[in-house]
Amino acid sequence: MESIEKIILTQIYLSGITGKSYKDNLKTKKGFTENIINSKIDELVKNKLITEDRNALTELGRSSLRVVLAGGVFDIIHPGHIHTLNAAKVLGDVLIVVVATDNTAIKMKKRQPLHSKEQRQELVNSLSMVDLCLIGQEDDIFKTVNLVKPQIIALGYDQVHQEKFIIEGCKKINLDAKVARLQSPIPESSSSKIQKEYGESIHGI
């Protein structure tokens, strides 16, 4: 499949989650013209990858995209995050990242996050390897998993989530997703370590 077709399928898939116009993104972010977009969509409809109304992916179209889901707090973006997210993106075509809510971040890190969930979402969305960043659900992480329906769920080296818990949770929502645990070459690089070394002064940066 041509890369331009994959890009269009990706944007239509993402629009189904965000509710935003995929054509606007293709024009503003990818620089595609209206003629190119319409021409390629005609082909994708003909090949039964996009629905006749041109607004969604068919089952065949969705299965042609390999979606990877990763999650974390992402309070202070550091080299460990970059390596982990790059490794996650290599596993598929689309990388969606979920940032923890502020309450979940406090439970996980035992401290108040420096940035709000909206700020952390904006930070992660600005990373080139990330296709979309979402804010997670406090009561049930599998609500977001069910929304995204990834083929792969990537866990960082320092994440406490157990693979068995993830796999069993996916089975309950009838999702056949594989779990990949990623390794970091910089295990000593962490948000908590950075904050500990810089202390309260980091709040004034």
Image (spheres, rainbow, N blue to C red):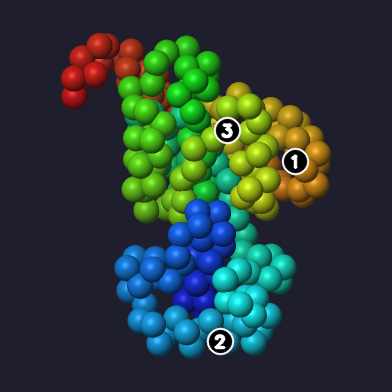
Q: Picture coordinates of residue 165 (x, y %)?
A: 74, 30
Residue denoted by label 1: 170
What's under tag 1, amino acid-wise? Cys
- Place residue 142 in its image quadrant: top right
Against 114, residue 34 (above or below) is below
User: From where the camera sits, is residue 40 visible?
Assistant: yes
Q: How many marks?
A: 3
- The quadrant of the image that shows the C terminus is top left
- In the displayed structure image, the side of residue 22 where residue 162 appears, left or right: right
- The quadrant of the image that shows the N terminus is bottom right
Q: Residue at x 36, y 77 (%)?
A: 32
Q: CA distance from mark 3 to mark 2?
A: 37 Å
Q: Picture coordinates of residue 34 (x, y %)?
A: 39, 82
- In the displayed structure image, the side of residue 167 where residue 106 appears, left or right: left
What's under tag 2, amino acid-wise? Asp
Q: SS class of the residue under badge 3?
A: loop
Against 177, residue 93 (above or below) is below
Query: Alpha-carbon neighbours of circle 1 within 10 Å: few (<14), some, or many (≥20)?
Result: many
Residue denoted by label 3: 137
Disc 1 or disc 2, which is closer to the eye? 2
Disc 1 or disc 3, which is closer to the eye? 3
Q: For this rendering, which residue is in front, 103 or 156? A: 103
Query: Alpha-carbon neighbours of circle 3 within 10 Å: few (<14), some, or many (≥20)?
Result: some
Instruction: Name the mark on residue 42.
Output: 2
Q: Picture coordinates of residue 53 (x, y %)?
A: 61, 77
Q: Picture coordinates of residue 97 (x, y %)?
A: 50, 43
Q: Earlier in the sequence, mark 3 or mark 2?
A: 2
What's under tag 3, amino acid-wise? Gln
